[in-house]
Amino acid sequence: MCGRYASSRKPEDLIEEFEVVESRIDKVLAPDYNVAPTKEVYAVVERPPSKEREERPERQLRVLKWGLVPSWAKDPAIGNRMINARMETVAEKPAYKRAFAKRRCLLPADGYFEWYPTSQLTAKGKPRKQPFFIRPQDGGTLAMAGLYEIWRDPTRDDDDPERFRWTCTVITTQAEDSLGHIHDRMPMMVEPDRWAAWLDPTAAQESLLDLLEPAAPGRLEAFPVSTLVSHVRNNGPELLEPLPLDEVLE
C-alpha cells in the first residue's frame, strides 16, 4: 500500500512541469513531508470540455482530499479507507471502475514511505518497524497514478460552494524486486511520455492499463529514515534525511 508520501513542490513549479493550462487551486498548500490520508494534496487532472464547447480537455492543477469518495456513496467517511486502489482490480471494482474510466489523475510526490518489520519487538511483542523513504534516483518528481471523484453533498444547497467534494486515491501495484523486501506493494507511476494519454478523459478504457508499468529496476532509491515519520504530527524536511547506519533498526 501507499499510506504516506512527501509533497513539497510549489504549485507554480508543478504547473510548469506538468504543462497545466489552468490552475484551479483556491489556496496554496504548505510543503508537506508527511502526507497522510484525509489530507489535501495537489493533483493534475484533465476535465472534459462542456457540451457547449468543442475544445480539447483542459489540464488543471487542483487540490483534492486523499481518500476517494465514490459519487454514489451515502457517507463520505468511506473515503477514509479508500486511499489505495489495486491495479489488478481497479477496472472492475465498483468503488473505482467509473473513476478509472473517466477520472484519472496524477499525484505529484517527492517520494513515498514504507515500513519494514524488524527483528526487534515492542513491549506488546510485535515487530518494531523501520521506515524507508523511496524516491526517484534523479531527484525528480514522482508522478503517481491516481483516480479522482466528485461527490455531491446532499445536505448542502445548490448555491453552496462547498457542495462538491473532490477526492482521490493512489493506484498501487506489485513492488519491483529491489523494493519488494521493504513492502510487497508500491504506487504505480506514470512516465512523462504517457501523462497525456493517462489523463485524457476520452481515452478508450481497454488501452489504459497498458499505460501503467512498475518502475524499472534502478529507477528508484530507498533509504532508512527516522521513526519520527511514523507520527503524522511530525512534519519537516528532516523526515527525508537518511538515517545513520548505527541508528537503523534491524
Image (cartoon, helix red, strand yellow):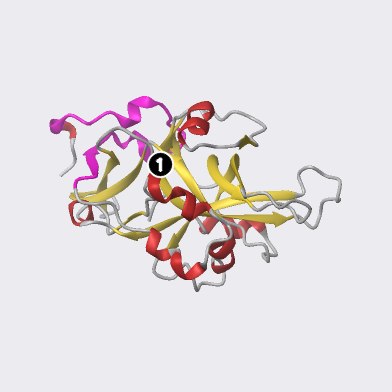
User: Relative to 58, does residue 87 appear above or below in the rendering?
Assistant: below
Q: Position of residue 205 (x, y in %)?
A: 51, 68
Q: Position of residue 53 (x, y in %)?
A: 74, 51
The structure residue drawn at horizontal position 14% and vertical position 32%, both measured from the top left corner, is 245
Q: In the rendering, at what x and y percent does residue 162 appear?
A: 76, 44
Front-most of residues 146 and 72: 146
Q: Amino acid at mark 1?
A: Tyr
* 104 vs 75, nearest the viewer: 104
Front residue of this view, candidates 18 and 121: 18
The residue that label 1 is drawn on is: 5
Residue occupying the point 48% across, 49% down: 196
Under tag 1, what secondary structure? strand
Magenta-drawn stretch contains 177: no
Residue drawn at 47 percent across, 45 percent down: 107
Q: Residue at 53% across / 40% down in the picture?
A: 41
Range of residues picked out in magenta:
218-246
> Within 10 Å of the Cα at label 1, are there few (<14), some (14-19), or many (20+) other Cα atoms?
many
Q: Which quarter of the image is occupied by the N terminus?
A: bottom left
Quadrant of res 161: top right
